[in-house]
Amino acid sequence: MNKYLIKIQEEIFMAKEKKLDANGYRKFGMLDRISYAAGDFGCNMSFALKSSIMAIFWTQFMALGEEMYATLLMVVQVWDAINDPLLGSMFDADKRNYKRGKFKTYILIGAIGLLFSGLFFFLPLPNAPKMMRCVLFVLGYVLWDAFYTIANVPYGSMMSVITTDGAERSELSTWRSIGSMIGNIVPMVLLPVICYDASNNLKGEVVFVAAIVMGVFGLVAFSFMLKTTEIRVEENSVTISEKKQKFNVFKAFGNFMKNRAAVGATLAAMAMFIGMQGSTTATTVLFQSYFGNAKASGIIMLISYLPMFLFMPFIKKIVNKYGKKEACAVGAAVSTFGALLLFLPLGNGTAGLIGYIVAQAFFGFGLGFYTCVSWALMADAIDYNEWKNHTKEEGTVYSLHSFFRKLAQGMGPSIVVLIMKVLGYDGSLGADQPIEVATNMKWLVAALYTFSAAVMFIAIAFVYDLNKKKVAEMTAELEERRAANTDMQA
């Protein structure tokens, strides 16, 4: 960590001394990596709290009931259907010159909104009338989702204007994943320790306090990113064909659906979230009632994130030698093997817990490939859209990707909660689920992980079509085209 801080200080000094690249920008380096990681850390200070503990908070502490919770969660996804593509297309169509720049202005608005909407969503009012609790859930979720989109869509799209170099994008993707992982580790490890009592039941008032603290940390992280991010590609740059036509959101959607790379990357992300996010509630119940230790659940789940650190120093070499698509496909295959290990009938004793840890290690090892370069896959898909359609639609392409991701994040957990209900889960019992129900949660988690990993493999290996050779061809042609457009505009 000290060497990273030293590099950041050196690069800040270089920028002050005007030691810039040939185009007048600060040279790409460690400051860019740390800065971009801070952005996803900021996002996940809000998102991870919501995704890791939301279902338990609303079904057990706020006592909405499984059916009502699942129904309301499905209803608010309608807002997602309007929210992401609408705001993304508005972002693309906005050609105004902001003092901070378009990307940074939108991110700042979203970051501030995330802080306050997160607090509203986790107001601890379990004794309020049920109608009021339902209104709090819907209104809180809608507000949180809107501000998350305002911050996250330009943040994700911004990779394409920080650098055009494929290897540097892979590094940004890796560091974004690191920021995401650290942002997830905080609620994953600390929340179970501080938010569950000795009987493994949730303390909702503590969740509200955690939302305040994490919201402040998220805003600080966003502020750091906005101050240190270097935009190297003109935000409102257009190709020749863009000058001849107005932005058309329906055409943009059609372009997205014809973009196999965008569709493949999106299917992989949806599969990951159905498995990881969809299984969150079942996993919590698994540790509450099967292993009987909710406080330890975060530490054990952390194992699935640790392999990312193994790949971080080598990701640039791996991508340069094998390609993003190729590395991710191998990783998804390894994750599938790890998920299948969860079906081993080892019981809920020490052997069962050790088997669960080993399976998580394999699953995380394979997932490490994907998480390190997943955002770079999407950045290449955005470039593919420009390459084939001669239009820059970063916001629309990314927002549609984000929409389908969030659809999986919302619909997956709501459907899984209904499945849990069918399998005997009763939120009013808290941690005191019968052993038969707890065992059902074990098999449900195994099935969700296997489905997730298998679909990820299919999406990356057979749908995503930007292999190493094709990416090199695309990048070279786009650089020539952009240079020619710049000369014509000069």
Image: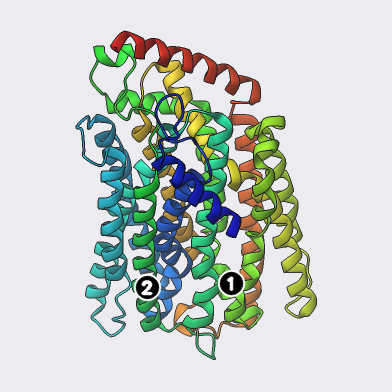
Q: Which mark is residue 213?
A: 2
Q: Position of residue 43 (x, y in %)?
A: 40, 56
Q: Is residue 425 visible from the viewing direction of this image? A: no
In the picture, the quarter occupied by the N terminus is bottom right
Q: How many marks can you see?
A: 2
Q: Position of residue 116 (x, y in %)?
A: 26, 65
Among the two numbered marks 2 and 1 on one chain, the one whose residue lies closer to the N terminus: 2
Left or right side of 49 for 136: left
Left or right side of 473 for 102: left
Q: Position of residue 224 (x, y in %)?
A: 38, 54
Q: Is residue 138 above or below residue 212?
A: above
Circle 1 sits in a helix, a strand or a loop, which is it?
Answer: helix
Within-10-Å neighbours for mark 1: few <14, some 14–19, many 20+: many
Circle 2 sits in a helix, a strand or a loop, which is it?
Answer: helix
Residue flagged by tag 1: what amino acid is it?
Gly
Q: Residue 232 appears in which quarter of the rendering? A: top left
Q: Which mark is residue 298?
A: 1
Q: Position of residue 273 (x, y in %)?
A: 52, 52
Left or right side of 376 for 132: left
